[in-house]
Amino acid sequence: MDWKFLQGLLSGVNKYSTAFGRIWLSVVFVFRVLVFVVAAERVWSDDQGHFDCNTRQPGCTNICYDYFFPISHIRLWALQLIFVTCPSFMVVLHVAYREERERKYQAKHGENTRLYDNPGQKHGGLWWTYLMSLFIKTAFEITFLYLLHYIYDSFKLPRKVQCDVSPCPNLVDCYISRPTEKTIFTYFMVGASVVCVVLNICEIFYLIALRMVNLRHRGSVHTSSRKIYPDTDFDGKSSLKE
């Protein structure tokens, strides 16, 4: 898979992210994508070839491997990285939509006019899009962590598993290659995923708290203006009939 293409797309997200979002991107690229590409893929490259069972029954080893590894860790992590990064493109697409509206507005009313003060500023619909992307990313992270634990019953890989699935003649012992090394990488990737979940939750609370502070500030400013100019409405126009 071409991870450079994904990195190029996500680099645009960094411009519209908060501090928590930038840390999240750094964790994803350095501790997940980079480790995945450089080391994890090589650790699992010989997974099936070195899965040995103490039987010569044709097909038994392949069936047992498929039984204990219905989906490879490496493919599950690849899907996870794709799913948790795609919601960030919602923000980029929304900003691109705003910029296109801004271009059409200026073409119609003149270059000195503006529809948005800053198309990338998280106000209005863009704020909701950004918040929704965080909820979706968090949901995907938790879902894949649950799937990994549910499929393998644990994050720790055993050294030996026992299999009696047909066409195995009886209960056979099968041995996983390099279980300690694979367990270490599994815990590392799970830990990085948990860190990303915590960062997403912190960013959600940060956005909501900042929004509440801004709304409260606007309410106090509006109340003060009404006290100073009791005969004016929201637009600053006189409410008295002449």
Image (cartoon, rainbow, N blue to C red):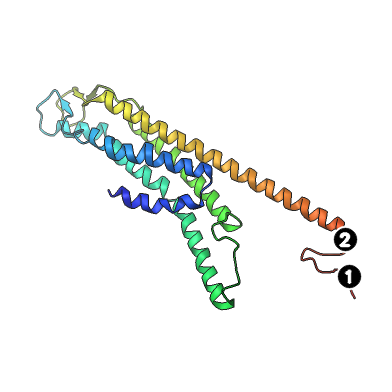
78 or 56: which is nearer to us?
78
Q: Secondary structure at mark 2?
A: loop
199 or 64: which is nearer to us?
199
**How far across and down, in percent of the image, does residue 217 sit?**
73, 49
Question: Dot 2: within a 10 Å radius of its alpha carbon, few (fewer than 14), some, or many (20 or more) residues?
Answer: few
**How far across and down, in percent of the image, does residue 59 sit?**
13, 34
Going by the numbered disc 1, the residue's amino acid type is Leu
Q: Is 213 placed above or below 99 here?
A: above
Residue at left 53%, top 54%? 129
Going by the numbered disc 2, the residue's amino acid type is Pro
41 or 147: which is nearer to us?
41
30 to the left or right of 236? left
Q: Name the residue carrying label 2.
A: 230
Quadrant holding the C terminus: bottom right
Question: Dot 1: within a 10 Å radius of its alpha carbon, few (fewer than 14), some, or many (20 or more) residues?
Answer: few
Q: Name the residue carrying label 1.
A: 240
